[in-house]
Amino acid sequence: MALTAGFLLLFACGRKENVMHLTGQVEGLKKGKIYLQKVQDSTLVSLDSLIVDGNSHFDFTTEIEEPEIFYLSVTRHNSVNKDTSLLFFGEKGEITINTSWNYFSAEAEVEGSETHEKLEEYQKVIRQFREKNLELVTEQLKAGKDSLKRDSLARLANKNTTRSYLYTLNFALGNADSYVAPYIALAEVANARIKYLDTINKSLSPEVAASKYGKALNEYIEEIKAREKQEEKKGKEE
């Protein structure tokens, strides 16, 4: 009997260790629904949800084996607000997200996830590249019929895009022990040259390589290599 009780206690403790406890508040949300979601088999599924009726605090608990991407989403009755989904890197332990209804993503503060902190470090810089590209696109539109100016701005935009790609590749290589590395390789530079993706893949720490995104990156690379090999073989036959 004592052995059975001990086993159950160990089992319960094991389950508790593989849990993410997410709490927080969406200030300004008076009535609506809050969802905790993630992608499973290429489909966005809701893991949990709660109805908001005056109290915009939320409390979700879900099992988790390793850091991965989750979404905190909100719907409000009779609303046209489109900024209602927040991507974050969840992990085991206590995580807090506080934000507002009016600026759901922009004002979101995520605490308790080291992996998300690393993602934010990356996003802070990459956001600057994207803002620069928007500025250049706006300038191209203003250039009107001035083809020389438009071409010059287009070249600057291409250079800026190339720099953002290089930053992403270098960030992934420089953080090969983070679960963020394979994720951004797939999400941001999946169409980069295979040799660059392969370099990232081979640099991942064993733990990260065996993770959800590590495995996905490896499978993606192997699929491309197989396809290129098949196309090369077909070309020789022709």
Image: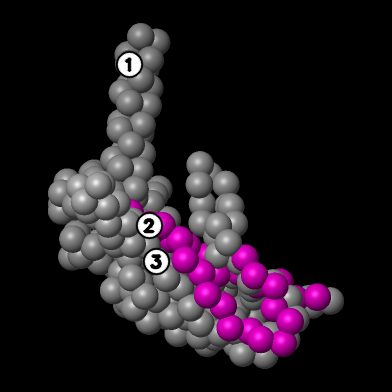
Q: Which amino acid is tagged 3?
A: Met
**Residue 69 point in image, percent of width and height:** 43, 61
Judging by the rendered image, the residue that carries numbered circle 1 is: 233
**Residue 125 point in image, percent of width and height:** 35, 78
Q: Earlier in the sequence, mark 1 or mark 2?
A: 2
Mark 1 and mark 3 residues within 8 Å of each other at the beta carbon: no
Range of residues picked out in magenta: 49-77
Asked whether residue 190 is in view, the answer is: yes
For residue 136: magenta? no
Q: Which amino acid is tagged 1?
A: Lys
Residue 84 horizontal side relative to residue 186, left or right: right
Q: Mark 2 Cα within 10 Å, few/some/many (few <14, many 20+)?
A: some
- Quick one: 14 or 21, which is closer to the camera? 14
- Mark nearest the camera among 1 and 2 is 2
State the image quarter where residue 100 is shown.
Answer: bottom right
- Mark nearest the camera among 1 and 3 is 3
Q: Is residue 224 above or below residue 206?
A: above
Query: Which quarter shows the C terminus?
Result: top left
Q: Earlier in the sequence, mark 1 or mark 3?
A: 3
Judging by the rendered image, the residue that carries numbered circle 2 is: 64
Residue at image position (51%, 56%) is 38
State the image quarter where residue 210 is shown.
Answer: top left
Q: Which amino acid is tagged 2?
A: Ile
